[in-house]
Image (cartoon, helix red, strand yellow):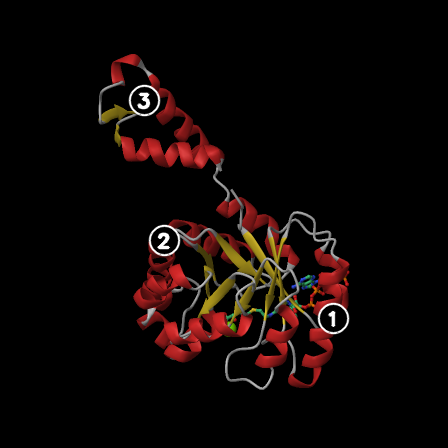
Amino acid sequence: MTRRRSALYMPASNARAIAKARTLDCDVVILDLEDAVAPEEKPAARDRVVEAVREGGSGARELVVRINGLGTPWYADDIAAVRGMGVDAVLVPKVSYPSDLEAIRVSLGEAGPPIWAMIETCAAILSLPALSQAAWGSRLTALIAGTNDLAKDMRCRPGADRTPLIPALAATVMAARAAGIVALDGVCNALDDPARFAAECAQGAMLGFDGKTLIHPSQIDAANAGFGPSEDELAWARAIVAAFAKPENADKGAIRLDGQMVERLHLAEAEAMLAR
Ligand SMILES: CC(C)(COP(=O)(O)OP(=O)(O)OC[C@H]1O[C@@H](n2cnc3c(N)ncnc32)[C@H](O)[C@@H]1OP(=O)(O)O)[C@@H](O)C(=O)NCCC(=O)NCCSC(=O)C[C@H](O)C(=O)O
Ligand SMILES: [Mg+2]
């Protein structure tokens, strides 16, 4: 099973950062043509992405390109560049409605890459059930929370604990799960606050996200730790599997284990975690 604990954005205008990506321990590299790149730099950044993907060298890391959104002056050229590029996915910002998804699918063509959608507008949050349903016919394989744009659109003040964003984050995870696709949490802008970053990873994992989007290499290790199962979780999963394997529990649906009720749905969860 592919892991997406850590997905690092890097500005496609920054050749040094792109080169560095080939040495980093993140699961996903996102070459960004959108917000990290100034308008006058976009054509050169697009050429750099084409070159970087052609050169390869990403190893096991998934390579994703974030293009500029529908309706922007750069969308058509970005689509033309990524269509046959052989990337693992194209990440499209500000996807708000199923009609956006359909337009992107058509632009990319029948043999186009999988689509990852940024969920970062109030309209997208209100459209999540429809976006989730539309995923089945659209090559949509991941939802990515865009917490900066969403906070801007909501005019909320997330603060360190992100309280105003929690309903939207939970709804994003539910929409992804209903569609059987990946859900990645938004970025943490606090570059020099590792405790806050670790707390955000724990919160994102608690909400059910598969991983977190990142803005700096210094965030990779904590994300890999925060979204990988912990030693305690692995030990608990092994204990559940061992308990249900006992002959006396063979025909039981629910058992007592270390003071907790454990059901066969927990066995299925434990087996899935150990398999991952
Ligand atoms: C945030 C930064 C601008 C900080 O830059 P800076 O202070 O210059 O970084 P450092 O000096 O600490 O860099 C140390 C070395 O690490 C490399 N580096 C830095 N960032 C990255 C990166 N993202 N990927 C790869 N490598 C990186 C530097 O090149 C240095 O290397 P070396 O010279 O060899 O020592 C900067 O980190 C940055 O630009 N980050 C990414 C910003 C970005 O992509 N933003 C857009 C995505 S976030 C977003 O849009 C969210 C969403 O849409 C929403 O709405 O929420
Ligand atoms: Mg955004």
Which residue matches tag 2? Answer: 177
Q: Name above or below for residue 54 compared with residue 125.
A: above
Query: Which residue is most to the top?
Result: 247
Residue 198 in sight from this viewpoint? yes
Q: Inspect the image, locate mark 3, and give the three-letter code of the amino acid beneath it.
A: Phe
| Foreground disc of the pair 1, 3 | 1
Q: Name above or below for residue 152 compared with residue 266.
A: below
Q: CA distance from mark 2 to mark 1?
A: 35 Å
Q: CA distance from mark 2 to mark 3?
A: 27 Å
248 horizontally vs 13: left or right: left
Mark sitting earlier along the chain (2/1)? 1
Mark 1 nearby-residue class (10 Å; few <14, some 14–19, many ≥20):
some
Image disc number at residue 244: 3
Image disc number at residue 48: 1
Mark sitting earlier along the chain (2/3)? 2
Do the residues bearing badges 2 and 3 touch, measured as CB atoms within 8 Å? no
Q: For numbered disc 2, what is the local secondary structure?
A: helix
